[in-house]
Image: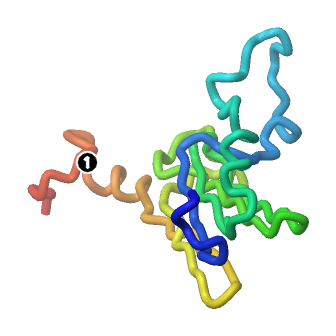
Amino acid sequence: MAEVDPETPIVVTTHLPLVSAIRQIYPTRNQTESSNDQWIVNRQEILDLFTNHNLKLVLQGHIHVMEDIYIHQSGIHYITGGSIAGRPSWQGFKNDESSGFLLIKIKDKDISWDFIDFGWRNYILNYGSDSIINTGNEKD
């Protein structure tokens, strides 16, 4: 990190979340089970790499829950994109099974996002039961 100017805005992407409130919202059912498989156990060590740098945004995923966390003290925005899988575990919007992606918008110092739903359920229902993969040979 020494070669990066400390004023340069930095965006980090990671599959597993560095910061999440999911354990407070959905506590582990079995408190004796190890939960390290879903979390970066050395996350503080990773975040410390950005000390004295301008880390602005962390884009993260894995947990199928939409989170938008802004830590005022550090000035870091953590956005967890829910799911593109359309699984029942998706808890992003009204506990539905939406499937899509986040469109991240950055303008000056403002960071925002929109969820773009691509309607996987309608696609599957309209395509038929032969295949759920779009091969370019859609039925008429």
Answer above or below: position of 35 versus 63.
above
Answer above or below: position of 89 versus 14.
above
In the shown orientation, is residue 27 left or right of residue 85? right
The N terminus, quarter of image:
bottom right
- Give me the residue at 70% from left, 84% from top: 110
Going by the picture, which residue comes out furthest to the bottom?
108
The C terminus, quarter of image:
bottom left
- Give me the residue at 59% from left, 68% from top: 10
**Of 64 and 110, which appears nearest the observer?**
110
In the shown orientation, is residue 49 left or right of residue 20? left
Going by the picture, which residue comes out furthest to the front?
2
In the shown orientation, is residue 29 left or right of residue 137? right
Colour scheme of the picture: rainbow
Residue 17 image offset from top left, x and y in percent: 65, 44
Going by the picture, which residue comes out furthest to the left?
137
Residue 120 image offset from top left, x and y in percent: 41, 55
Q: Amino acid at mark 1?
A: Gly
Q: Quadrant of residue 39?
A: top right
Q: Which residue is mark 1?
A: 128
- Give me the residue at 59% from left, 73% from top: 5
**Of 140 and 1, which appears nearest the observer?**
1
Residue 105 image offset from top left, x and y in percent: 57, 80
Q: Secondary structure at mark 1?
A: loop
Residue 60 image offset from top left, x and y in percent: 60, 51
**Of 101 and 98, which appears nearest the observer?**
101
**Of 112 and 51, which appears nearest the observer?**
51
Answer above or below: position of 44 versus 5.
above
- Give me the residue at 26% from left, 41% from top: 129
What crowding class fits label 1: few (fewer than 14 Cα within 10 Å), some (14-19), or many (20 or more)?
A: few
Q: How many marks?
A: 1
